Image (cartoon, rainbow, N blue to C red):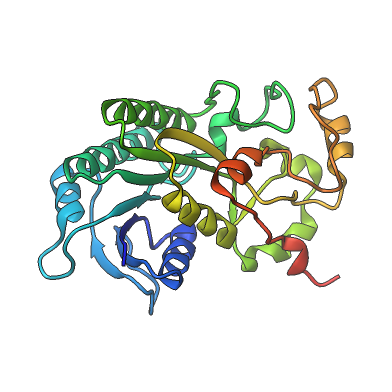
Amino acid sequence: MTAVLVTGGSGKLGRAVVTHLAEHGYDVVNVDTAAPPPGQPARFTRVDLTDLGQVVEVMHGVDDRYRGIDAVVHLAAIPAPGLRPSGATFANNVVATHHVFLAARQAGIRNVVWASSETVLGLPFETPPPYVPVDEEYAVRPESTYSLGKAVEEEMARHFARWDPELKILALRFSNVMVEEDYAQFASFRPEDRDWNLWSYIDAVDGAEAVRLALESDLRGFEAFVIASPDTVLETPSAELAATYLPDVPVRRPLEGHETLLGIDKARRLLGWAPRRSWRYHVER
């Protein structure tokens, strides 16, 4: 049984990841500052990831709770701009990620999957993207301190991978994470309410599957993947959204139906990821 340490396993995406990994036979350890939900299928240790000593210890094992970790899923962070002052957000997120990468390296762990963010693509798109669907092929364009932190973390990951050719360190650029309880609000969305991320989202269960497939992939080095649901949050066809709200942005291929404008082809191709869940199946019509 593979032992996986999940940071932030008590959070919105983290809960789905812990459950999904446990269902697929992984031995999961959740480290977080917040307590897990009742009945979570993981051992729990409260950890401050900005304290390097604590992070080093949890990579090796904590007392009699567990011994040894085979892989790391790093999800813990202040999850969005504006929740804390910018300096506090940067200091928490970047330092915590550095400590996770460093402690994993010192423990000999070479399988690391972590949460970057769709925001590195240029969100909010007050400056239009270079083309749609947007993908991983253009340079990151952080527009907030939160996003700048994620860009710094991706650059750190590149160098950790350079230092160790056997390391796999995969960044998953998650879109706005949603669970079934969130879908009732989608009917009230207007196009102008959600253009900041090109009307995209990611179902937490599909996001958890992307994490598992990234853990199980045979890739090496650093790679980044956009992770979004296959459709948008609206009933308006995607081609119409692009023509109306992004009239001067090149459309690189025909847009079919309600397909996402965050390009997920790389994750499909290299991870074998096939997101299937949509809000449309959970809303009465």
Q: Residue at x 31, y 52 (%)?
A: 71
The residue at the far front in this view is 218
- Front residue of this view, candidates 44 and 160: 160
Q: Residue at x 73, y 33 (%)?
A: 133
Q: Residue at x 37, y 74 (%)?
A: 41
- Asked which quadrant contains residue 221, the reply is top left
Q: Is residue 222 above or below residue 188?
A: above
- Front residue of this view, candidates 270 and 230: 270
- Residue 222: horizontal and vertical position, in percent? 41, 33
* Residue 21 shows up from this direction: yes
- Front residue of this view, candidates 41 and 162: 162
Q: How many numbered dots are placed on residues in this image?
A: 0
* Residue 227 shows up from this direction: no
Q: Quadrant of the C terminus?
A: bottom right
- Residue 216: horizontal and vertical position, in percent? 44, 53
Q: Is residue 264 above or below residue 60?
A: above
Left/right placement of residue 146 relative to residue 31 reads right
Left/right placement of residue 261 relative to residue 138 reads right
- Asked which quadrant contains residue 276, the reply is bottom right
- Residue 253: horizontal and vertical position, in percent? 82, 31
Left/right placement of residue 59 relative to residue 210 reads left
Q: Is residue 9 above or below residue 119?
A: below
Q: Quadrant of the N terminus?
A: bottom left
Q: Residue at x 53, y 58 (%)?
A: 209
